Amino acid sequence: MRKVIEPSEIIVDLPTLEEDQTHVSPWNRFLARYFDYAIFSISLLPLIWKFGEVLANYSLLFPFSFLLLLPSKALWIPVEALLVSTWGYTPGKFLLNIKLLHNRKKLTFSKALRRSFLVWVRGIGLGIPFITIITQFSAYIQLYSRMKTSWDEEEKVKTIQKPIPLWMIIAIAIFIIIYYWSFSIIRPSF
């Protein structure tokens, strides 16, 4: 005996628009992260310059004053975790329409904190020059070939992106270039 299924009995669990848009360009993720670093570093400039004044008193250490920027990326970890767990994104991710989710919900603070730490270690290479290049290139290859990063896979985080206009990507890229270029040529007078 065959059972006839009525159309009203069929339940289809269709993916939402957010679930369909899971591929996020590695370049958009890179731009979002470095936009966040730039904005956060700008907020820390008075503190960085104050430490620069102290370093200037030790003439042997002054050439290494660029190292003052490295801790800002580590200090960003809890700030990023707070923003991601509260809003689901950071300012850079917001501008580029990138959102982080776990089981269709915002990340908890502890999950966001672990993810941010893993990004800092595996993606940013602790902010150490030259190591950063290697870790970012490795993360790019992994994201391009597997469509996910090790930290998102480990924390079971889904990164989604909705379409954005090209002018927004260009504007953010120009802002980042100008920020890092200006920071390299504009030094406070100690």
Image: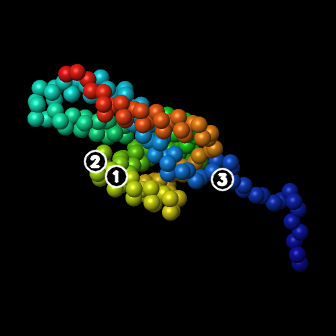
| Residue 166 falls in image quadrant | top right
Image position, residue 118 (x, y; %): 37, 50
Q: Residue at label 3?
A: 20
Image position, residue 179 (x, y; %): 40, 32
Real-space Cα separation, disc 3 to disc 2, in angstroms: 37 Å
Describe the element under mark 1 as helix, strand or loop: helix
How packed mark 3 is, by other alpha carbons closer than 10 Å (few <14, some 14-19, many 20 or more), is few
Q: Residue sitting at 21 percent across and 34 percent down?
A: 65
In depth, the one of 158 and 43 nearer the eye is 43
Q: Are marks 3 and 1 in contact (CB under 8 Å)?
A: no
Describe the element under mark 2 as helix, strand or loop: loop
Q: Are marks 2 and 1 in contact (CB under 8 Å)?
A: yes
Q: Is residue 74 visible?
A: yes
Residue 81 tag number: none
Q: Is residue 121 visible?
A: no
Quadrant of the drawing holding the C terminus: top left
Q: Residue at label 1?
A: 133
Which of pointers 3 and 1 indicates the residue nearer the eye?
Answer: 1
In depth, the one of 3 and 183 nearer the eye is 183
How packed mark 2 is, by other alpha carbons closer than 10 Å (few <14, some 14-19, many 20 or more), is few
Furthest toward the bottom, the residue is: 1
Q: Residue sitting at 37 percent across and 40 percent down?
A: 77
Which of pointers 3 and 2 indicates the residue nearer the eye?
Answer: 2
Which numbered disc, 3 or 1, marks the residue that appears first in the sequence? 3
Three-letter amino acid code at disc 2? Pro
Three-letter amino acid code at disc 1? Ile
Quadrant of the drawing holding the N terminus: bottom right
In depth, the one of 38 and 10 nearer the eye is 38
Image position, residue 37 (x, y; %): 39, 36
